[in-house]
Image (cartoon, helix red, strand yellow):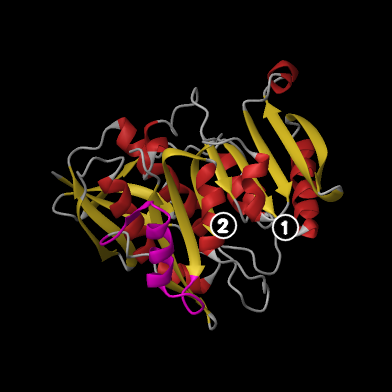
């Protein structure tokens, strides 16, 4: 067994920065139970040279282990502790990210979720379901759904990983802002892409639109559907199954509306779960975040259990609660659809 230390990425948001070590430790615990095969032990915190680290013990890390750890949402650097823990031997990271991170950091708007937290949600949904076996494989198409995508931070994170992403958002202004930014970003980066749009009709009326964006390394690849794709649908999330086939997605992430100042829409999880689950593959994982000041954890767990999914409980899955601001205390729950 060897000892390791993980340096947490500094956060621009001070409140999130304070929570980041504990969130990273919980995320590492989930990785340890899933993609690292239960070989991570003794996760804790330690100051080295006055700087806080997340520490853990594991057998010698394989190249694949390092590839998984490199994608932890707040990892800045990884070290093996040597000479009784007095020296740090750096371990080179091998991140999955395929594009410049300004895709995530440029957009700024009221109510935007912290990029590191969005990455944490995406990671949990990937490693806890059947996607855990394939999300690192560039030859396997993994599809991620955000059914309440807002202005698309989760879609961008999935795209950064080279995955296919789809989102549904009822606010047409958010959808338009997302499309304007993303298409402009693709042009600025000189990435080959194709944009297709179609109106959505229901009961003889236009209720929204759908945009499909294929991205690839060449025109031929784009014409064939792209190396990866993003779809965003302007519609109520209750109609998600109208837009995607049954058992389409490998993972689902959702930062549920908080029901406070910047977002007063009401969304009852029990009302939308049947449609969401219909488009998920067997064994797909859901990672959901919400404001516990508005809805208690027990209520969320009851809705998920009633829908027939397997809720992950106990350590480390109960370690993601943290303060966002005076009105929001955020938590995360992970569940897996039947079939795994």
Magenta region: 291-315
Element under label 2?
A: helix
The crowd level at tag 2 (other Cα within 10 Å; few <14, some 14-19, many 20+) is some
Q: In which quarter of the image is the C terminus?
A: top left
Relative horizontal placement of residue 212, taking residue 322 as reference (left or right): right
Residue assigned mark 1: 170
Query: Which residue is at the front of the view, 75 or 137?
Result: 137
Rendered residue at 76%/40% (across/down): 211
Element under label 1?
A: loop
> Which disc number belongs to residue 304?
none
Rendered residue at 78%/41% (across/down): 183
Query: Which residue is at the front of the view, 208 or 291?
Result: 208
Query: Which residue is at the front of the view, 308 or 191?
Result: 308
Rendered residue at 45%/34% (across/down): 135
Judge whether residue 293 is colored magenta. yes
Name the residue at the bottom extreme: 326
Residue 151 placement (x, y as % from top left): 69, 56
């Amino acid at each position: 067994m060897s000892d390791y230390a993980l340096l947490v990425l500094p956060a621009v948001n001070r409140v999130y920065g304070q929570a980041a070590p504990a969130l990273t430790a919980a995320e590492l615990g989930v990785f340890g139970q899933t993609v690292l095969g239960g070989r991570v032990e003794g996760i804790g915190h330690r100051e080295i040279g006055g700087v806080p680290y997340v520490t853990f013990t594991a057998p010698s890390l394989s190249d694949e282990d390092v590839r998984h750890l490199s994608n932890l949402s707040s990892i800045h650097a990884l070290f093996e502790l040597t000479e009784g823990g007095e020296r740090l031997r750096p371990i080179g990271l091998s991140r999955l990210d395929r594009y410049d991170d300004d895709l995530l950091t440029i957009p700024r708007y009221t109510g935007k979720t912290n990029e590191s937290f969005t990455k944490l949600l995406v990671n949990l949904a990937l490693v806890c379901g059947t996607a855990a076996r394939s999300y690192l494989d560039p030859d396997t198409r993994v599809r991620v759904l955000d059914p309440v995508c807002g202005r698309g931070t989760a879609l961008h994170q999935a795209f950064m990983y080279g995955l296919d992403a789809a989102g549904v958002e009822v606010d047409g202004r958010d959808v338009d802002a997302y499309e304007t930014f993303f298409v402009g970003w693709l042009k600025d980066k000189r990435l080959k892409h194709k944009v297709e749009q179609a109106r959505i009709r229901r009961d003889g009326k236009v209720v929204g639109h759908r945009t499909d964006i294929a991205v690839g390394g060449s025109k031929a690849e784009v014409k064939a559907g792209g190396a990866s794709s993003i779809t965003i649908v302007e519609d109520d999330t209750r109609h998600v199954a109208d837009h995607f086939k049954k058992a389409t997605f490998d993972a689902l992430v959702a930062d549920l509306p908080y029901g406070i100042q910047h977002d007063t829409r009401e969304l009852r999880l029990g009302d939308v779960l049947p449609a969401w689950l219909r488009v998920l593959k067997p064994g797909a994982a859901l990672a959901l975040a919400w404001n516990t000041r508005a809805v208690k954890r027990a209520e969320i767990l009851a809705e998920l259990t009633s829908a027939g999914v397997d809720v992950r409980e106990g350590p480390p899955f109960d370690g993601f609660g943290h303060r966002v601001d005076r009105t929001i205390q955020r938590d995360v729950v992970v569940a897996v659809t039947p079939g795994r």
